[in-house]
Amino acid sequence: MSEFNEAANTQPAFADFLGLKVTHISRERVTAELAVREELNNRHGIMHGGAIMSLADNLGGTATTANLKPGQTTATIESKTNFFAGIPVGDVAYAECTPLHRGRSTMVWQTRVTRGDGKLCALVTQTQAVLEPRK
């Protein structure tokens, strides 16, 4: 299977709500960017941690979907985030999601979130369940 599942091209409404722009999708990597605007401010002039986690969660779901067989779906079952630096309002969050494990029943993804100057801001590791179609 070299081509990815085309369902990965369809982003959920929440991604649009956030303002997330997916810039690359393949079975091995998903990238995106998100402009840090006032609506994503944590009241200290930097991107809210929940917005960073939402960005990463969306990429993990997209990456898993890119690897699914027809009829399969996915859901996040675990997520862990380490925060290293803030991303100021007016900057852009860049995210790259790559696989740590792609199995039959779970997939584990790591998303690196950086800011415009290239500094690592967060590292997110998440586990996605691979769900079979209901019969």
Image (cartoon, helix red, strand yellow):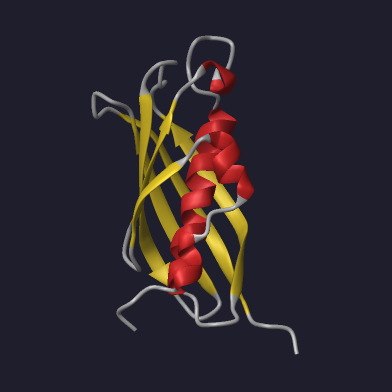
Could you say where residue 15 lies in the image, as x and y percent from the top left? 55, 44
Q: Residue at x 55, y 32 (%)?
A: 51
Measured along the vertical axis of the image, is residue 74 above or below residue 31?
below
Measured along the vertical axis of the image, is residue 16 above or below residue 88?
below
Decide which of 69, 76 is in the foreground and name it.
69
Decide which of 9, 85 is in the foreground and name it.
9
Image quadrant occupied by the N terminus: bottom left
Q: Residue at x 59, y 78 (%)?
A: 72
Question: Going by the image, does 84 lie left or right of 61?
Answer: left
Residue at the far bottom: name it.
135
Image quadrant occupied by the C terminus: bottom right
Question: Going by the image, does 18 lie left or right of 25?
Answer: right
Give the total of numbered labels. 0
Question: Going by the image, does 69 lie left or right of 100?
Answer: right
Could you say where residue 124 lies in the image, as x and y percent from the top left? 45, 45
Could you say where residue 23 lies in the image, as x and y percent from the top left? 34, 48
Q: Residue at x 56, y 42 (%)?
A: 16
Q: Residue at x 50, y 41 (%)?
A: 55
> Residue 101's quadrant in the figure?
bottom left
Residue at the far top: name it.
44
Could you say where residue 4 lies in the image, as x and y percent from the top left? 38, 73
Decide which of 28, 108 is in the foreground and name it.
28
Residue at the far right: name it.
135
Measured along the vertical axis of the image, is residue 61 above or below residue 18?
below
